Image (cartoon, rainbow, N blue to C red):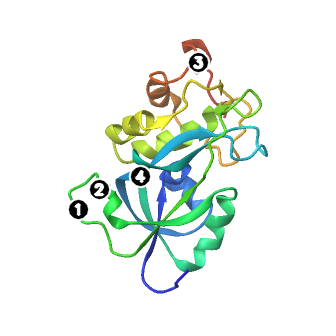
Amino acid sequence: MSTSGRHFILGYGSLINADSRAKTGETGNVWPVKLQGYARHWSVMSTEFGMSSVAVVAQTDAYCNGVLVEVAYDQFTLFDERERGYQRSQIAPQSLTPYQDEALPQGTYWIYHTHQVVPPDSHCPIALSYVDVILAGCLEHSKTFANDFLLLTQGWHQPTLNDRLVPRYPRVQADLSTQPLNQLIATVTNLSERELSVSYEL
């Protein structure tokens, strides 16, 4: 890839969360956006941690939301390592619509995507330790943005695990307040209210 100009990654999962991004590398400003041309699904991307992740696949009439994150060229190897199992491709600026009344920056836009969705199963379920990080990141922008994440993600009916007591997600944020997150998750999950109520032990 060219080292010239400004480069941006479209984060649509845990990269939405500022603290989570910081655990991988240095990033710059962030713009919340909606992307046309990709559908977001829950998918088994790796069995390493015994959990599923969100992934996007190209689909002309689909949308997902995320954040456009400025990343310096010398940081890309760090994010490529974080997103092992995904392919990084350029996306067209005209496929993005900002949430805020602000023009998006000029530069080269990238997204990590997959070509095949593998549905979550009991061995690699949707893990709340991962969902919590994403939704906390969404709430950094607005509740509308968080609700759009839920609406524009397919596969919530798949096996789900409240793993907060023994988190499977390696970048877990156990200090998060789970009450506002549970209110969001309750609208899409197959977990019961009792199952959702289990929280982190600090």
Q: Quick one: which residue is furthest to the bottom in this view?
A: 4
Q: Position of residue 163 (x, y in %)?
A: 69, 30
Q: Residues within 10 Å of mark 2 (few under 14, many from 20)?
A: some
Badge 3: how crowded within 10 Å, few (<14), some, or many (20+)? Answer: some
| Badge 4 amino acid | Gly
* Quadrant in which the N terminus is drawn: bottom right
Residue for badge 3: 191
Mark 2 vs mark 1, CA separation in Å: 7 Å
Q: Amino acid at mark 1?
A: Glu
Q: Residue furthest front?
A: 60
* For marks 4 and 3 on the same chain, the one whose residue lies earlier in the sequence: 4
Secondary structure category for the residue under label 1: loop
Q: Is residue 126 above or below residue 76?
A: above
Local secondary structure at mark 2? strand
Q: Which mark is residue 37?
A: 4
Q: Residue at x 64, y 57 (%)?
A: 86
Label 4 to label 3: alpha-carbon separation: 30 Å
The label shown at residue 131 is none
Residue, disc 2: 98
**The one of 200 and 36 positioned closer to us in this rendering:** 36
Say which quadrant the C terminus sits in: top right
User: Please, what is the three-letter code of the amino acid marked with disc 3?
Assistant: Leu
